[in-house]
Image (cartoon, rainbow, N blue to C red):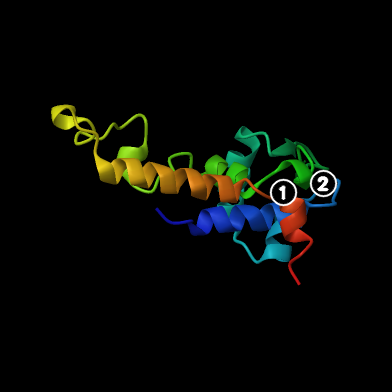
């Protein structure tokens, strides 16, 4: 597992929207040096996760659905990549064939599950507001 470029750009989209009533995709792209097709793809996922909201029409654009004080890196990363697991067998939808084989739990699976939980805890530790306002 690694944090994808799309996840990184999603945080940049939120950074552009922070403190703004509404921005067009063009304004977001200009501020964060993103391409429009990629920004639209990210915004669609963030909208589905209720992190941003979209407005249609002549004065359309995007805004944050909730303040950055209520959004964590884990929220953003899971909105973009909901199957973000260290390895496939961590995904509850894809159970590990070795975990519990012969009545014994897989020790590697158990350790990776512990590491994954710690990673998720770290990613949800601080709000984006704290992270974005301490970038200097």
Q: Is residue 99 above or below residue 34?
A: above
Question: In the image, which is nearer the foreground, mark 2 or mark 1?
Answer: 1
- Report the residue at 61% width, 52% height from top: 10
Mark 2 or mark 1: whose residue is earlier in sequence: 2
Q: Residue 80, how many percent across, how many down?
A: 53, 44
Asked whether residue 9 appears in the rendered view, the answer is yes
Image quadrant where residue 83 sits:
top left
Q: Residue 14, how many percent across, how many down?
A: 70, 51
- Helix or strand or loop: what does disc 2 sit on? loop
Q: Residue 123, how many percent across, how many down?
A: 58, 50
Where, quadrant-wise, is the C terminus in this rendering? bottom right
In terms of depth relative to the viewer, which is nearer, 79 or 42?
79
The dot on residue 127 is 1
- Report the residue at 39% width, 53% height from top: 1
* Residue sitting at the far bottom: 136
Q: Which residue is mark 2?
A: 22
- Report the residue at 26% width, 43% height from top: 107
Whether pointer 2 and pointer 1 mark residues with C-beta atoms closer than 8 Å, the reply is no
- Report the residue at 60% width, 45% height from top: 76
Asked whether residue 27 appears in the rendered view, the answer is no
- Callout 2: 10 Å neighbours few (<14), some, many (20+)? some
- Helix or strand or loop: what does disc 1 sit on? loop
In terms of depth relative to the viewer, which is nearer, 43 or 73?
73
Q: Is residue 104 above or below residue 29?
A: above
* Residue sitting at the far left: 102
């Amino acid at each position: 597992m690694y944090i994808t470029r799309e996840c990184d750009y999603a945080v940049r989209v939120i950074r552009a929207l922070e403190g703004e009533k509404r921005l067009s995709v063009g304004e977001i792209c200009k501020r964060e040096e993103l391409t429009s097709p990629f920004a639209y793809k990210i915004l669609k996922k963030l909208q589905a996760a209720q992190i941003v909201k979209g407005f249609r029409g002549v004065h359309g654009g995007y805004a944050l659905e909730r303040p950055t004080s209520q959004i964590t890196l884990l929220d953003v990363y899971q909105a973009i990549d909901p199957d973000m697991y260290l390895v496939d067998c961590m995904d509850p939808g894809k159970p590990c064939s070795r975990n519990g084989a012969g009545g014994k739990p897989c020790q590697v699976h158990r350790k990776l599950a512990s590491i994954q939980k710690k990673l998720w805890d770290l990613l949800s530790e601080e709000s984006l507001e704290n992270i974005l306002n301490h970038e200097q």
